[in-house]
Image (tube, rainbow, N blue to C red):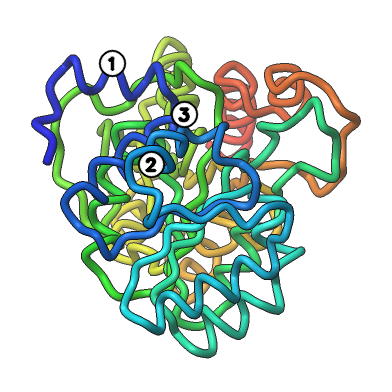
Amino acid sequence: MYKFSSTDIRTWALLGQRGTLGKVLYDMIGERKNIIAMTADQGALIGFHRIQNQYPDNFINMGISEQNAIGVAAGLSNEGYIPFLAFQAAFTSLRCADQTHVAMAYMGLNIKLIGIFSGLTQGDCGPTHYALHDIALYRSFPKVTVLSPSDATQMVKVLQATSEVFSPTYIRIGGPNNLPIVYKEDFDFQIGKAITLREGKDVAIIATGSMVYNSLKAAEILSSKGISSTIMDMHTIKPLDKQAVKESLSHKLIVTVEEHSIYGGLGGAVAENLSLLKKRPPHLIIGTQGEYPHAASYSYLLEQAGLTPEKIALKIENTYKEIC
């Protein structure tokens, strides 16, 4: 569908992951009429207005009725449609836990649930809109695939790949518009296969989502201090790429970085795999510490959570010095 030209990639970056979601689904529906774009009153924020105008039969706005939206998506999936249902990640998880537990995990229906404004993205709205627990929830559900794309280009790959696979899927997206670009050209994407973006010998940094770009920048800071880092983009948190985790064992320190609670997310998934290995280096989990910070701008909250490149690098440097 796409050539992944430099123009495409710059356009997606300007749109951000939410805008790219609307654009890509619009193009996909033009080719596949069994795809349904659904939302819970968030269509204007994710570019679904074009779908509504051009393909009204392929668009459903459920209003502020998130739990009911899961039921409608389940019915559509049961009739052979592929519903892509998108609304706030804070509500895709806890508010809809029972419905997704039944329709996605137990029944195994082909629902593509997309949590927008993940992590601390909706900082101005306060703790009720933070999504710092969604990975932990959906990683615990049987049958559900969990994906967290790192930039808008990878978002395109995720949408294309998930539309071809019959599987209940949770896709976690966040970050601002004009999102930093991680992938500047076409690349191979496979669900469940991590991507190594940088090779190093001292520290293996396994990152996901918005923290992939920040980890790349942190690696540059560490390099200036004589610490060499490998960077892995673990875009698929479930099923986790166990082979990639094993390959990190040659480093002196393993670090996981995520815009999510340190409990039950990517760090927990990697730790569970490391626990089965006899010889393993120390593992540093970087994420939010479990508190609910007060409402503030996204950039301020990242700073306070220690998720900026500078603070990520400092945590890694201090831990590295302690063990070496």
Residue shown at the point (61%, 41%) measured from the top left:
42
Q: Which amino acid lies under the numbered mark 2 shown in the image of this protein?
A: Ile
| Sooner in the amino-acid sequence: mark 2 or mark 1 | 1
Q: Is residue 148 in view?
A: yes
Residue shown at the point (55%, 40%) measured from the top left:
43
* Left or right, 158 with reference to 78: left
Q: Dot 1 lies on which element?
A: helix
Image mark for residue 56? none
Q: Which amino acid lies under the numbered mark 3 shown in the image of this protein?
A: Ser
For label 1, the residue is: 10
Q: Position of residue 15 (x, y in %)?
A: 41, 22
User: Which residue of the protein is positioned furthest toward the right in this rendering?
Assistant: 294
Which quarter of the picture shows residue 97?
Answer: bottom right
Q: Dot 2 lies on which element?
A: helix
Residue shown at the point (27%, 65%) measured from the top left:
34
Q: Dot 3 lies on which element?
A: helix
* Left or right, 100 with reference to 4: right
Image mark for residue 215? 3
Residue shown at the point (51%, 42%) measured from the top left:
173
